[in-house]
Amino acid sequence: MAHPPPSGSVVLMDWYRSVEGKGFFSRIKRKEKRRIFGLLEAPPIPPLINVDTVRYKVFLSGKSGVGKTALAARLAGLDVSSVHYETIGIQTSVVFWPVKLRDSGQVLLFRLHLWDCGENALRRFDHLLPTCKEQLDAVLFLFSFTDHSSFDDLPGQIARGCDPSDNVVKLVVGTKFDLFMHTDVTEREVKAFQEQWAVPVFCIGGDACDDLQNVAPLLNTLAELLWHQDCVTVGAVPANESAVGDTSSRAGH
Amino acid sequence: MLQAGAVQLLCLTASSGVPLFCRGASKQLPFSVIGSLNGVHMFAGGQGVQLFNCDTDRGGRVLWKVFHDSVMLIAVTGQRSDACGNLQLRRLLDNVWNCMVLVLGLEELTNVRNVERLKRELRSCYQLIDTFLDIGKDWMGDLTHCVECLLPAQPAVLQDTLNAFAQAAESDFGCLLVHGKMVVATDKWWRLAPQEVVLLAALVRTLGGSACCDCPIFLPQGSPTVPHRLLRFQLLPGVNVCMLCGPTPTLQSVEGELVVRFWRPLVDMLHGCQALHQRCFPGSVGLHRDVLALLLINRESSRAVSSVHPAPSAPGAPSPIRRWELLRLLFTFATTRYFSQTEAPQKGEQLPPPEEFAPGFSDQPQQCYLVTDECKFFALQTPQHQLYILTAVSVPTFALRPLATRTLSTLTDSTGF
C-alpha cells in the first residue's frame, strides 16, 4: 500500500476557521448546530461558484459497544444517545464536508456516507458484511480507550476488514478518550501502533457538542486521504507524492 | 387523579426463572422480589391456577404473561395510577414480546440452548422496548393498536409514486412515514397485522436522523421464523420511505439508483407532509379552537388519526405532552369502562366486566363524557368510527356532544377517513 501523504499537504486543515471557509461551512450549519440533510437534499451552493460534490462510502468497524454509532452521530452532527444501544442492522448517515485543496485552491464538497453495523447483527446475518464492504472507499477502525482488548484486536480487524490489494483508505479512531480515569490504553502504545502500521490514529471523546473543531481534524484527514487515493488511481500523481487537483475522477453533482 | 407512572418490566425464562433483563424504572427491584414474583406465579401454576394480575395494598399492580412456554414477562407498577391499568400493561407485555420477536425471531426465543447467549442477544431489543416504556410519548399506537396516520392533501400522487418505487425495488411492501405516522402504504403493507405496522413505525422512530438502514427483522405474526430486510431511506428529516425486501436489492443500489429518481420530483409535496406532522390532517379542514386534542379511529381498517394540535388554541391550555397523556387516559377510560373491546381476549384470559352499571343491561354505551378541573372529555362511537376529544374547561358541558358530532363529520366528510 502507498504511504499516505503528509498531513495537510493536500487539503488546508484550518480552512474551516478562515473567512472564506466560514462562508461554506455556514451552509452545513443551522443555528450553531449541524444541519441534517435528507437523501433528497444537499447544502445549497450558490450557482456561480464551481464546487464539485465527491461521494465516498466509509465503513465503521469495531467491537460491540466501542462507539461506532456514537462516532457516526458525532461526525454527522446528530444527537449522540447517552445510553448505549446495540444497533440492530446497518445504519448509515451522510456527512457533508467542504474542503479546499492546497495546490489548485479548488473547493470540493465531500459527501461521506458512513456505514455502521451492529456487531451482533453482523454475526447473526451473513449478508450484512458483504453489503457494507461493497464498493468501499475507506474504513474507520475503532477501538475504545477504556477496553484494551479492543485495541489488541486492531491488527485482526484490519486484516479482516479489507484485503491488502484493496484501494481502501484506513484510519484508526480511539473512542472514549475523555474517560482518562478508566484509560486502559497508553499513549505510547498508540504511538507505537501508528508507527508500525503507518495508519493515522485519532482520539475522540468528551462532550459531543457540535463544534466543527471536534471533528475537523478527522474529517479533513479522511478527505485528504480519499482525494489522494483517487488521484493515485487515475495516475494524476505518483503513489508517494501529494496530490494535485483533478476533479474528473469522482466528480458527481 | 390523572397521573402517569413508571412501569418496571422484568423478563425471565419461563421454565427456570432465570432473569434475562429488566427495563424501565430507574431503581431496579431487588433480586429477591423478582424471585418471589416468579415464585408466586410458579406456585399458582403448580396448583392448576393461572395467575394473570394482582393489585397490592398500596396501589401497585403486577401483571404476568408467559409467551410460548419459554419467556415470562412481568410488568410492575409502584403507585396507583390510571395510566397503568390492566389494559395498558397487557398491551405493553404484548408489544414487548413482539419487539423481541421482531429483532431476534421466534426460534431464538423459544428454543433456548444457552441462556447467557440469549441475554446478550436480547440487548439488541432494548432500544425498541424502551420506546414502549417511555412515558412521555407523543404517539399512542402502542395503546390503541391502530396504525397512526397522517392524511396528506394529495394522497393519490404519493400513492402512485410509492407503488412505482416499491415495484422498481422488487418489493410488494412499501410505506411512507412522516415522524412515525403513515402517509401512504402499498396494499400488501396494509395487510400486515396492525400491531406489526405499529411496531415497524416504532422501529423507524428509534432510528432517528440516520440516512438509511437495512435491518434484518422478523414479523411477529406474518413471518416469525424467516427474516426479511427492512430498508428505510430518510428523504427529508423525519420523512422516511420503508420497504420490506428479500435478499435483493442491495441498500446501496436502491439508495443510489431509485430514491432520488422517484422522490425528487415530489420534494415540495413531501415538505408539505412534513409541515403537517403535528396536525395530521390537511389545513383545509377547520376545527373549533376549543378542541385541544383528538383521536379518531376507523374501526374497520384499524387506522387512527391523533393530534394534540388540531387547531390554534388559547393560552393557558395544557402543554402538548400533557395533552398526549390526557388523550391516552381518556382512551383507556372510555374503552375499559364503556366501549366494547376492539380485540378478542387472549385464550383463557378473562376480561374484567366493562363497568358496574353494565350487569343486567344489554345496551352498549355509544357516548361518554368526563369533566375534570383541567379539561373536559367526550368520546363517541359509531359502527365505523370512534372519536375522542379533549376540550377546554370553558366549553359548557351540554355543548360537548354537538362539538364532538360536528368534529367527527367535519373530519370524515373532508378526508374520507
Image (cartoon, coloured by chain):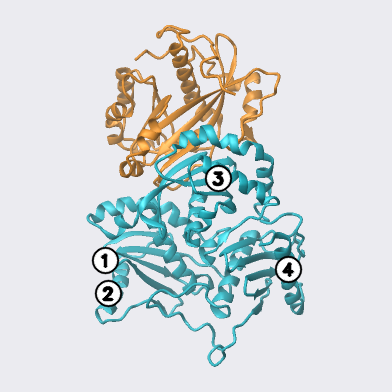
Q: Please tell me which of labels 1 and 3 falls first in the chain.
A: 1
A227 versus B386 height, above or below? above
Disc 4 is placed on an element classified as helix
- The residue that mark 2 highlights is B42
Q: What tint does the image give chain A? A: orange
- State the mark number for residue B17: 1
Say whether mark 4 and mark 2 are on the same chain: yes
* First reached walking from the N terminus: tag 2 or tag 4: 2
Nearest-to-viewer mark from 2 and 4: 4
Q: Tell me how far mark 3 sits from mark 2, CA to CA.
A: 45 Å
Question: Residue B45: image x %, image y %?
Answer: 27, 77
Name the amino acid, label 1.
Gly
Badge 1 or badge 2: first in the primary sequence: 1
Mark 4: few/some/many CA within 10 Å (<14, 14-19, 20+):
few
The quarter of the rendered structure image containing the C terminus of chain B is: bottom right
Residue at the image point whose x is 27% and y is 29% from the top? A156
Q: In this view, does B386 lie above or below A117?
A: below
Residue underneath mark 4 = B409
Residue at position x 57%, y 91% from top? B361
Tags 1 and 2 both on a single chain: yes
Q: Is mark 3 on a helix, strand or loop?
A: strand
Residue B65 found in image quarter: bottom left
Question: What colour denotes chain B?
Answer: cyan
Q: Where is residue B76 in the image (x, y as percent from the top left)?
A: 41, 69
Sooner in the amino-acid sequence: mark 1 or mark 4: 1
Indicate the quadrant where residue B235 lies: top right
Kindly report the distance in space between the C-alpha atoms of the residues bearing marks 1 and 3: 41 Å
Contact flag, marks 1 and 2 (Cβ < 8 Å): yes
**Closer to us: mark 3 or mark 2?**
3
Mark 4 — on which chain does it sit? B
